[in-house]
Image: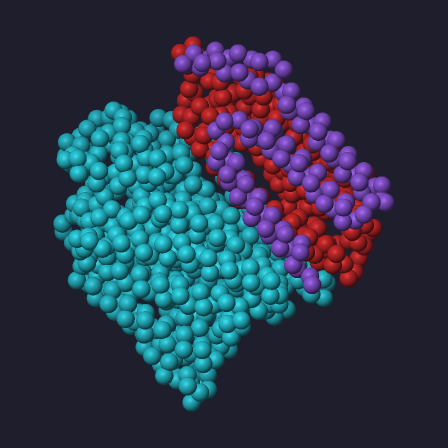
Chain colours: A purple, B red, C cyan
Amino acid sequence: MSAHQDPSSAEGRQYRHEGPRNHYITFILSILLTIFAFAAVIYGDLDRGFVLWFLSILAIVQAVFQVVYWMHMKDRGHAYAILYISMGALIALTAFAAAAFWMWW
Amino acid sequence: MSSVHDTAGRLPAEPEKATLEGRNKILGFWLFLAAEVVLFGTLFASFITLRNQVPEGPTADELFKLSTVAISTFILLTSSLTSVLGTISLHRHNLSGLLGWMTVTVLLGLAFLGLEVYEFVEYVHEGHQFTSSAFATSFYTLVGFHGAHVLFGVLWITTLILQAFRKGLTVVTAPKFYVAGLYWHFIDVVWVFIFTIVYLMGKVG
Amino acid sequence: MAHSHAVKRYSGIMDWLTTVDHKKIGILYLAAGALFFILGGIEALLIRLQLLYPNQDLFVGETFNQLLTMHGTTMIFLAAMPLVFGFMNAVVPLQIGARDVAFPFVNALGFWLFFLGGVLLNLSWFLGGAPDAGWTAYPPLASSQFSGTGVDFYVLGLQISGIGSLIGAINFLVTIINMRAPGMSFMRMPLFTWTSFVTSTLILFAFPALTVGLVELMFDRIFGGAFYEVAKGGNVVLWQHLFWIFGHPEVYILVLPAFGIISEVVSTFSKKRLFGYSSMVFATVLIGFLAFMTWVHHMFTTGLGPIANAIFSVATMAIAIPTGVKIFNWLFTMWGGQIRFTTANLWAVGFIPSFVIGGMTGVMLAAPPADYQYHDTYFVVGHFHYVIVGGVVFGLFAGAYYWWPKMFGRLLNETLGKWHFWTFFIGFHLTFFPQHFLGLMGMPRRVFTYLPNQGLDEGNFISSIGAFLMGVGTLVFLVNIVVSASKKYAASADPWDGRTLEWSISSPAPEYNFAQTPLVRGLDALWKEKMAGNKGMTPAEPLGPIHMPSPSIMPLVMSIGLFIAGFGFMYHQYVLCVIGIGITFVCMLLRSIFDDHGWHIEKEELEKKGAEA
């Protein structure tokens, strides 16, 4: 949690290293989301359609947290990373949706 | 390509971004990951098309044991945490911390792989073979591709750890570790979708 | 592995085998692409020879199927794509004021992977027959039950080449994003660089879909998988989706760089800046985005239903809008300009009506009820040849005449160039215009003969004559290349009074491109300096030693490794797979462990060259 002051920048600007706090939070959150997902399946009385959407949302939320925090996407200098990953995700989602809804009729 | 230090001889704050080469590598790797998103996306699309096509052999519901999946998930998730703790050590110019966390990451990755191999062997004995059905082929391809990515990551990070003993932490080695960390997180993110779509949804039907 | 102080320089063949210089790699791509273009052209001529008259039996049945499969596969993957990459390599770093691409080693690797993939594919002719399931390789025709080993060559050859394309795309994206000269914002980039940027994005996202499709086909054929085995629950339409999610963006990957070339050529030879630069950029990006939203128009007849068909029909027609914006902008660029009809400009001007015709028949095809009539007939063949030959190939020829002096230090002969243009242009229209009518009259695609007196005789005859005329035109071009190579005088740095940065350095470009990185003060960076009365660009940095990357044989070795593994997979000799992949991985390991320190061109050498210039 320490804000580590690193004086090695030539301009004299202080660079504050982020501590691991956000990363631990992401870890705990991921565990919790995973537990919720498993629980929704194991306790088998829920409506199938609801469970499928619920699992999808839990997965997407967990993925977003991991990408934003663990992969430093929220830090500056990630504009292209965000743009390209978003485009890839959109295309992947389109292909996945086409497959999920169109392949058998 | 020697180390870039400021006048006091210290490594810059974010050593992986201190050179054009490092910045190029990081951007190039994010672009590669974007392509991998589409790659796994289409593999998932193929799986979701074929997941109920089991004319012969056991179905998903019959096969999967959620306890094994839960353990694998926990192992990989923890390894993703340890790798980002490694990156924090990188930013704090703490070489031994970096190498320590990366070693733990590799060991957890190996554990994950071992569990997956055991799981596949069990399935084969239960009649769920690669050629059994369209479901089986797509299952082994999707999950197998992910496993192959984990294996590659394990080998890659191991070679980086060994290199760092000789070369230390420099503006040349830093981007390599940073990029390997990104890769490792990515395969954990893919696993989130695998355990959800393959295993959990397989149980739901 | 270069030590930090020893300068490793090769000469002769070794220079070309180990080069990591984008200019040389560009020439390698162009040479290989030209070679495969001739091969694909010969395959086309044999097809047209067979179809010259009804009921011929020169090339029938399986032989004909192999010819048509290889013609399409070769032209798209081994001719058009590498020629596009060749120009991107030769030109983009120069246009943005950079000294090379972001990853020179990976650039070389991309070339050798493409080349060896292409060689692998073509070895099939000698090893049991070429693939014969069409360039689209639909299962179940392409599965091991209904086709021979040729399709294995297709799967593995394209897989290896495809990796080359993907890494090439990443390279250009990083180069354009990170390595532009100071002052060159995105909206000051030349159009060819913009189209290279969008094209690379398309490659990045389209090729993984092909990779997955090919992996699945390979697993079915080689390991007994069941992706496309209906009896085991497989789904053959899945292949079609995966192939066309790749395949439709692929054709925009081919045509967008051609659009970029046309923008450069038209503005240079009208002595006017490109009309509507911002809308051109926006149109390019929009085309790139829409390219991913239209793939089902190749599958209108597979029974996906009227709603799906309608959605994709509208999306397909929508692409015509930004394309139309571009056409109008080129016309408005020429309007009021001082037009010079150099050969390059002839190709650009010939491109405009030809591509528009192809685009128009594309909109016709986009209507599903109409497509039920056109599908799998020669109407489609006419359409796509109009856009690919009339669009992409014309654009590539324009680029060749335009940038030849910058690459080789010689101009191509203008008289021969005009003979080339007119024979090829007339031949092209003779070949493909009648094919629309043949299709409307019911002649199906991919048939090796037709009956006489069905109304198809004249159209086929004229079409075949046209094809031979195109062959003549290509020969004239080859003669032109040889003739210009023997010329005694060298071309000047700026033979066309150009507008963009590549014309500010000598012809051919020096090894390091720019002695000093230029300072860019606006769009059409060089023209801006000329209009301000300057002789050349203002430098953005002092003269100093230039760091160059070391040459390496490893890209070639790594590609050979995958080539060997490909054979291993095809013939189920898994030891070969281990050896081949092992070679590739060992090279990657060595590359990681031994850092390339490169070598330096010293300031004194640059000053000497500057004094000589």
Looking at the image, residue B18 lies above or below residue C204: above
Looking at the image, residue C94 lies above or below residue C47: above
**Left or right of C191, for residue C415:** left
Instruction: Give the camera-side residue of B150 and C287.
Output: C287
Q: Residue at x 53, y 16 (%)?
A: A16
Residue C12 visible in this rendered orientation of the protein: yes
Residue C378 locus on image (x, y percent): 45, 74
Residue C27 visible in this rendered orientation of the protein: no
Residue C273 locus on image (x, y percent): 24, 46
Q: Residue at x 76, y 38 (%)?
A: A37
Q: Residue at x 67, y 46 (%)?
A: B144
Instruction: Give the camera-side residue of C57 and A28.
Output: A28
Residue C13 locus on image (x, y percent): 32, 47
Residue B41 locus on image (x, y percent): 61, 47
| Picture quadrant of residue C380 | bottom left
Task: Name the quarter where the N terminus of chain A is drawn.
Answer: top right
**Left or right of C55, for residue A61:** right
| Picture quadrant of residue A105 | bottom right
**Left or right of C610, for residue C45:** right
Q: Residue at x 46, y 18 (%)?
A: B12
